[in-house]
Image: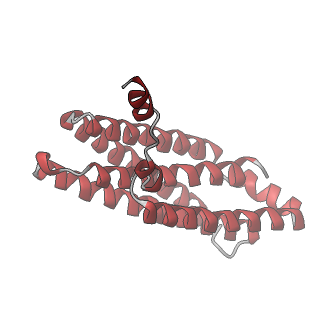
């Protein structure tokens, strides 16, 4: 009896391993997205060594204050998303909804700040064709900007569904939205130092 109990306690949950939060297909998508951004960052590093002075001058033009604020903003939204998943798993629907709403509002603030920064660049003529650095700047941040919009749409749809029927929510949907949102966090944590700090 004691041996049986010990075996049950040590039993590996293979389903949890083979079915990560959000499902295996979502994680394949996330890995492909990270690989794509990784290739772009590798290209950025390569051209940085080709034109070090140009890249240094271009980096100096970027608004590091806004970039830093946006980093804090996006990480804060990620914190609330993690809290939302936690609350929904505990079936604390009210706090889960509030946390997801906070995620969406703070994530929207990221887009607003980034748009303001884009206008700064465009007003002084620093477009995608300015030089190789700004080609990568617009490519990387623009692609990430689109991902944040998609993430906000996904989270908003999930939130509306939960609000309309609090008893019918699926934790898998929330975990999927959370996984995609945390991918946006991770990508920005790679982009920010590569563009704003390293060069």
Residue 5's place in the image compared with 167, above or below, is: above
Residue 142 seen anywhere in this rendered image of the structure? no
Left-right relation of 162 to 193: left
Q: Nearer the viewer, residue 81 or 25?
A: 25
Residue 177's place in the image compared with 127, above or below, is: above
Q: Nearer the viewer, residue 78 or 145?
A: 78
Left-right relation of 70 to 148: right
Give the colour scheme shown: secondary structure
Q: Nearer the viewer, residue 121 or 144?
A: 144
Residue 53's place in the image compared with 110, above or below, is: below
Q: Position of residue 88 (x, y in %)?
A: 26, 39
Q: Residue furthest bottom?
A: 129
- Residue at the spot 52% in from the left edge and 45% down from the top edge: 70
Q: Quadrant of residue 187?
A: bottom right
Q: Residue furthest front?
A: 1
Left-right relation of 53 to 191: right
Which quadrant of the figure contains the N terminus? top left
Q: Position of residue 35 (x, y in %)?
A: 63, 65
Q: Quadrant of residue 36?
A: bottom right
- Residue at the spot 44% in from the left edge and 39% down from the top edge: 11
- Residue at the spot 57% in from the left edge and 67% down from the top edge: 32
Q: Position of residue 102 (x, y in %)?
A: 32, 40
Residue 87 seen anywhere in this rendered image of the structure? yes
């Amino acid at each position: 009896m004691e041996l049986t109990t010990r075996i049950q306690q040590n039993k590996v949950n293979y389903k949890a391993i083979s079915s990560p939060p959000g499902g295996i297909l979502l994680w394949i998508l996330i890995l492909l997205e990270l690989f794509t951004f990784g290739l772009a960052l590798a290209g950025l590093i390569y051209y940085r060594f080709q034109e070090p002075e140009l890249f240094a001058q271009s980096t100096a033009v970027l608004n590091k204050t806004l970039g830093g604020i946006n980093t804090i903003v996006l990480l804060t939204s990620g914190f609330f998303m993690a809290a939302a998943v936690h609350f929904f798993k505990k079936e604390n629907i009210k706090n889960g909804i509030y946390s997801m709403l906070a995620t969406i509002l703070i994530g929207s603030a990221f887009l607003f700040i980034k748009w303001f920064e884009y206008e700064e660049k465009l007003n002084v003529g620093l477009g995608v064709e300015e030089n190789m650095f700004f080609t990568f700047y617009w490519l990387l941040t623009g692609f990430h900007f689109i991902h944040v919009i998609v993430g906000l749409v996904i989270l908003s749809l999930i939130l509306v569904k939960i609000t309309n029927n609090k008893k019918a929510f699926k934790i898998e949907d929330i975990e999927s939205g959370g996984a995609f949102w945390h991918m946006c966090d991770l990508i920005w944590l790679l982009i920010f130092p590569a563009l704003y700090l390293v060069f």
